[in-house]
């Protein structure tokens, strides 16, 4: 198990990143809490070592993306609608969201991670393909299609 | 900066979220460690039995940690060794330790090679060149042999070094508190001397500072019978006392 010190450090370093990935996929704070616990518990129990911070970050991102995916697929999620979501009181919906963010969030889910990793985290297609485990060509295709969709949603306005 | 980057920047993890997550992780660690401590002792006994019964070789010999060497200067790191005295895992106990381990690959090395590598590491040298003490704490059934091996390392005699032993009980407790075994042992000694100090204080002080407090209180308590550098260090400090 990783030491408390290492876990503290990981939360300090990557909480914002994990929060953003949750922001892409989840609709309420409670679900985000769930994902945080899943991701950092995995980190605690991970016995491998990271070559460097970049390596560690990529690992966290992959775990977070997969955790969100699994969560959205799970039985619990499909059958139990949290009261919050039903009443549309969610931490996400409370805040003013820019047009650009709304557009990204409204993309089909297969594009969201790639868009985030490319435009926010600054990874290139090769690095993204390593993280989400898809072929590099697939990543290029996803990016170009996402760009098109975003342009349409933003009425031709430039977002890059 | 593109607009996406700009807008996403505003999305941050709430403090409550971070704190709640950390509390959850601490509880999970406690829960899991409660189960592993007794298993550790059982596993060592079982591994020893199987080794004798089936001869040398096998998974448990190569991958499970049976000995630990914690190294405290100001950086605080721990090497976990398998039955063949080779490093199977390294852990850092503070920022400085983590910075030093980053980019070092000590796994698979014999503990002496690992210690040599550490002493040759430039970042590590910066700490010991300033006259800081290097403290080794050994937790192992093989303590005597490992201690001898450590003392034979080039770096050991070159710098102000000391070597102590500790039992696995101390090691687990130290882990529970998230500090190195060396520091926990110092903490226990301080408490035995009736000194009012808590774990958090120890966490933030260097091992040298803790031993200084110990020596101020009782000049003989820091010394180890094993004749480690403790005796020499005492001589050194006498000159340096303010």
Image: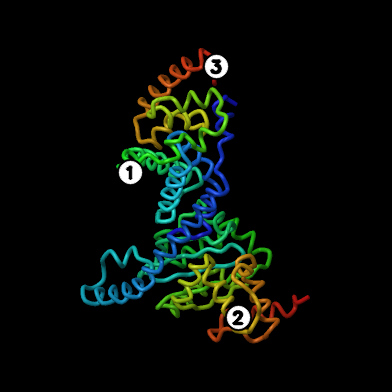
Parent chain of label 3: A
- Between residues B204 and B240, which one lies in front from this camera angle? B204
The residue indicated by pointer 1 is: A76
Parent chain of label 2: B
Real-space CA distance between mark 1 and mark 3, rounded to the nearest whole angstrom: 39 Å
Can residue B48 be seen here? The reply is: yes
Real-space CA distance between mark 2 and mark 1, rounded to the nearest whole angstrom: 50 Å
Real-space CA distance between mark 2 and mark 3, rounded to the nearest whole angstrom: 66 Å
Percent of width and height locating residue A25? 43, 35
The residue indicated by pointer 2 is: B191
The residue indicated by pointer 3 is: A158
- Between residues B208 and B144, which one lies in front from this camera angle? B208
Please identify the quadrant where the N terminus of chain B is shown: top right
Q: Is B110 above or below relative to A62?
A: below
Q: Are discs 2 and 1 located on one and the same chain?
A: no
Q: Specify few, some or many for label 2: CA neighbours under 10 Å numbering under 14, 14-19, or 20 or more.
A: some
Left/right placement of residue A83 relative to residue B55 reads: right
Percent of width and height locating residue B60? 30, 66
Which residue occupies the extreme left position in the image? B54
Q: Are discs 2 and 3 located on one and the same chain?
A: no
Q: Secondary structure at mark 3?
A: loop
Q: Is B83 above or below relative to A92?
A: below
Which corner quadrant of the image does residue B56 belong to? bottom left
């Amino acid at each position: 198990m990783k030491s408390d010190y290492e876990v503290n450090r990981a939360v300090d370093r990557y909480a914002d990143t994990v929060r953003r990935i949750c922001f892409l996929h989840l609709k309420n704070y409670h679900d985000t809490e769930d994902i945080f616990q899943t991701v950092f518990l995995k980190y605690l129990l991970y016995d491998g070592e990271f070559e460097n911070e970049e390596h560690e970050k990529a690992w966290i991102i992959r775990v977070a993306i997969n955790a969100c995916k699994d969560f959205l697929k799970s039985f619990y999620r499909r059958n139990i609608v949290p009261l919050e979501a039903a009443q549309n009181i969610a931490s996400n919906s409370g805040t003013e969201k820019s047009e650009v963010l709304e557009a990204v969030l409204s993309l089909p889910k297969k594009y969201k991670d790639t868009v985030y990793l490319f435009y926010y985290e600054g990874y290139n297609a090769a690095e993204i393909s390593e993280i989400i485990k898809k072929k590099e060509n697939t990543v290029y295709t996803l990016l170009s299609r996402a760009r098109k969709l975003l342009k349409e949603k933003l009425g031709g306005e430039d977002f890059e | 900066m593109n607009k996406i980057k700009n807008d996403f920047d505003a999305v941050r993890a709430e403090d409550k979220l971070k704190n709640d997550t950390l509390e959850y992780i601490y509880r999970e660690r406690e829960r899991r460690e409660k189960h592993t401590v007794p298993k550790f002792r059982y596993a060592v006994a079982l591994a020893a039995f199987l080794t004798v019964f089936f001869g040398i070789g096998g998974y448990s010999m190569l991958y499970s940690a049976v000995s630990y060497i914690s190294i405290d200067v100001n950086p605080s790191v721990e090497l976990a060794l398998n039955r063949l005295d080779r490093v199977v895992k390294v852990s850092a106990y503070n920022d400085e330790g983590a910075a030093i381990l980053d980019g070092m690959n000590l796994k698979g090395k014999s503990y002496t090679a690992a210690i040599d590598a550490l002493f040759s590491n430039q970042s590590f040298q910066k700490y010991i060149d300033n006259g800081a003490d290097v403290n080794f704490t050994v937790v192992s059934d093989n303590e005597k042999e490992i201690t001898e091996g450590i003392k034979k390392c080039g770096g050991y005699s070159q710098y102000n070094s000391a070597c102590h032993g500790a039992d696995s009980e101390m090691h687990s407790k130290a882990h529970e508190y998230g500090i190195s075994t060396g520091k926990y042992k110092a903490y226990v000694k301080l408490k035995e001397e009736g000194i009012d100090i808590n774990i958090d204080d120890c966490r933030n002080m260097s091992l040298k500072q803790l031993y200084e407090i110990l020596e101020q209180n009782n000049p003989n308590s820091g010394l180890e019978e094993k004749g480690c550098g403790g005796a020499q260090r005492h001589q050194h400090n006498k000159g340096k006392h303010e």
